Image: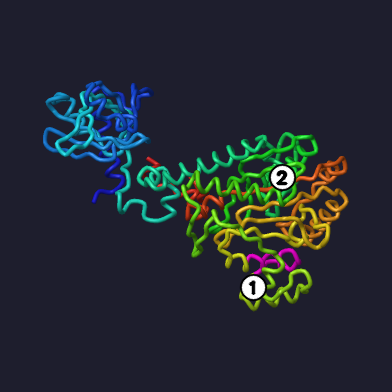
Amino acid sequence: MASISELRESRLQKLRLLEKAGKEIFPAKTNKDHDAISILAGFDVFCESKEQLIVAGRLLAIRAHGSAAFLDLFDGTGKLQLHLKEDVLGKESFDLFVNSIDIGDFIEAYGTAFKTKRGESTLEVTEWKLLTKSLLPLPEKWHGLVNDDERYRKRYLDLLQNNGLRDLFVKKSKFWDVTRTFLKEKGFLEVETPVLETTTGGAEARPFKTHHNDFDLEVYLRISVGELWQKRLMAAGFPKTFEIGKVYRNEGGSLEHLQEFTNMEFYWAYASYEDGMRLVEEMYKRIAIEVFGKTEFECRGHKFDLGKEWVRIDYREEVLRQTGVDVISASDDEIKSKLQELHIKYDGTNRERLTDTLWKYCRKNIAGPALLINHPKIIAPLAKAMHDNLELTESFQPIIAGSEVGRGYSELNDPIDQRNRFEHQQKLLEGGDEEAMMPDWEFVEMLEHGMPPTCGFGFGERLFAILAGVSMREAQLFPLMRPEQRTEVEDE
């Protein structure tokens, strides 16, 4: 078997052959006037009209048979079969094609529609033109991209050869389109908020840090989709806002976690978490039907039906039921003891992290759809406390397949309470908790000017990945990869 270097050299020789024949190797323009999907959709009409069609795309297969050849041309919309004959093209043009064109090259072809004896929709080529000469071969269909690292690094080849993967990202685009349309229909205004922040409010995660040269200022990439900014818009008089955008978290990756991903957050003035729960349930059902065409799913060992009744699960009661620990009254040592008994690793010793770690063990056993409610105040620093139990908050999280797929609450708009909670978070930071929330004192000042009762909610790509039955990393077009060592071919 020839090496990659040998195959590349062979293609370079073919490139020189084309140059010698006076052909442009990388032209900037094509006369393409039809795409594969439109031709195939109206093929019988094109057969009758004998209209000359101009197509362009990448060759995925070449089947030569003496003085004729069949080609598979892919243009991104579909695959179209082309037929080349020496007596139609002329010997010189046909021979040049056979001797210089490879699978992977991009060509432009002129031709008329006809059906083969086997009834295959085909274009009889009368003229061809090279658009791009590929110097490296495509991977073999069955043995090319052999592992995930190679697939992610050469995602363009993975997408080219994997119809299911391309369909996944068509669905992902529709996922966000349906979300956006739903919220706009409900009267929400789409906004844009800063990505660079001086404090990373709105979530608990380790941020990425960078330096703003002009201001000579340390800034952070945001870890939420403008939560504290959108709340400022509530104070400014906007009744409903939302944003869909990238967030960044400098922490470990896993089946459910990435360092860069897309989230949506909405804020709804004069609404409570009860209003939010009803809206979110309606939105998720709409996404399931319009994007996936169903409400029943199976993922990670769980089966769930978003179309059925969504049960409500009390945070404290569920942890007590599964572990025997009351997260409100138990001591830190009791929680640690239970974590050790369950063989669960935990980082840090503060109450917030211990409580959250214990809950994460419990959630894996919930198929859903469910709405987790009544989170302890210690793990919800931006949520309004319940009026009849100040230890709990008016908060909710949709749970499916053992995972949290969103988070919302009645937003805390009491500036005194918010200041106290930020001071607590500051102590956690000073104690070494890198995921504690950075205080934003200007946000507290805004609350002192007054913010109406508000419901906020956010969800992200995790929901899409679970409904699609893939990992978060697989649901990324181009996952972050360490730079690959250069090869001899690249250095030539």
Front: mark 2 or 1: 1
Report x, y in % for residue 38: 34, 30
The dot on residue 475 is none
Residues drawn in magenta: 346-360
Residue at (65, 76) in percent of width and height: 340
Q: Is residue 214 left or right of 258 when viewed as pictured?
A: right
Q: Is residue 191 visible?
A: no
Residue 140 lies, in percent from the top left, at: 29, 49
From what the image shows, is residue 272 above or below residue 355? Answer: above
Query: In which quarter of the view is residue 189 placed?
Result: top right
Q: In the image, is residue 353 above or below residue 154? A: below
Q: Alpha-carbon distance for marks 2 and 1? A: 32 Å
Q: Amino acid at mark 1?
A: Gln
Q: Residue at x 12, y 26 (%)?
A: 87
Q: Is residue 355 magenta?
A: yes
Identify the element where label 2 is drawn.
Answer: helix
Location of the C terminus by quadrant is top left
- What amino acid is labelled 2 in the image? Glu
Binning the other alpha carbons within 10 Å of mark 2 as few (below 14), some (14 to 19) or many (20 upward) gives many
Q: Earlier in the sequence, mark 2 or mark 1?
A: 2
Q: Position of residue 286 (x, y in %)?
A: 55, 45
Asked if residue 474 is positioned above or below residue 355 in the image, the reply reads: above
Residue contact between numbered discs 2 and 1, judged by CB atoms under 8 Å: no
Element assignment for label 1:
helix
The residue identified by callout 1 is 322
> In this view of the protein, can residue 106 be seen by the observer?
yes
Q: Which residue is mark 2?
A: 227
